[in-house]
Structures are given as structure tokens and as C-alpha cells.
Image: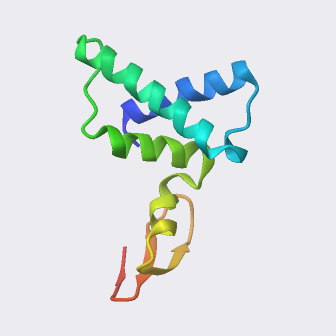
Amino acid sequence: MTNAVQVITERVRDQVRREGVDLASDHTLARRFVDDEVRSYTERALGGSTPLLADEAVAAREVVASLTGFGALQPLLDDPGIEEIWINAPDDDLSIDTQFRLGR
């Protein structure tokens, strides 16, 4: 997760705490909060106060996955070509078994 994505994630978490909402049960609200914060971050970045996002859509997906999904594992879980994911330890590489090959 890039520093920009971490900043956006924390700002959305702060908003969730202030408003007392549950993003896990309302995906539309989660997307709205994240899209609003990505837009706000991009405006600040265009003003030169923060680095630009490489891809706003990718950043938004990462933030939503972090807040309502399984974080870095979410893209793997969403990929229909991945059959198995093995996690040996939090600080170890993942082993991923796709329908085509085994990789890390």
C-alpha cells in the first residue's frame, strides 16, 4: 500500500468514526466515502501539497479493499483464475496456485 493510499484510508476511517457508520454493510456508502476522499486528495496533490496518485481507480479499489474487504488479499480473492492462496506466516511470501501455474 502506497503512502497516498494509507493517507486516504486513514482519512476515510476518521470520517467513519465521526459519523458512526458501518461501511462493511453498505458498499455504496463505502465507495462514496472513498471516491470523495480520493477526489479531495487529488485536489491537494494538484496544488502541490501531496504526491499525485498514479491511478485514482486503483487507489480507490485498494482503499475499499482495506476498509471493507481483505486488504492486499482482496484482488487475489476476486481473481477467478486463482484457485488457492497459501499463507505461511504474516512476514512470509504468499504462494498462489492459479489454473495455469504455481507462483509467488
- Viewer-closest of 41 and 104: 41
Q: Residue at x 45, y 32 (%)?
A: 35
Residue 35 falls left or right of residue 19: left
Q: Residue at x 56, y 71 (%)?
A: 88
Instruction: Point out the residue furthest to the bottom here.
Output: 100
* Vertical order, 5 against 49 (above or below): below
Query: Does residue 27 appear to the left or right of 101 in the view shown?
Result: right
Give residue 50's quadrant in the image. top left
Farthest residue toward the right?
20
Dividing the picture into quarters, in which one does residue 29 lie?
top right
Residue at coordinates 67% horizontally, 27% vertically from top-left? 16
Drawn side of residue 55 relative to residue 61, left or right: left
In the rendered picture of this protein, how many numbered marks are placed on residues?
Answer: 0
Q: In front here: 98 or 80?
A: 80
Quadrant of residue 99 in the image? bottom left
Residue 7 is at least partly visible in this image = no
- Residue 14 appearing in the image: yes
Residue 9 pos. (x, y %): 51, 32
Counting from the top left corner in percent of width and height, residue 51 is at 26, 24
| Rendered image coloring scheme | rainbow
Q: Is residue 64 above or below residue 40?
A: below
Q: Residue at x 55, y 30 (%)?
A: 33
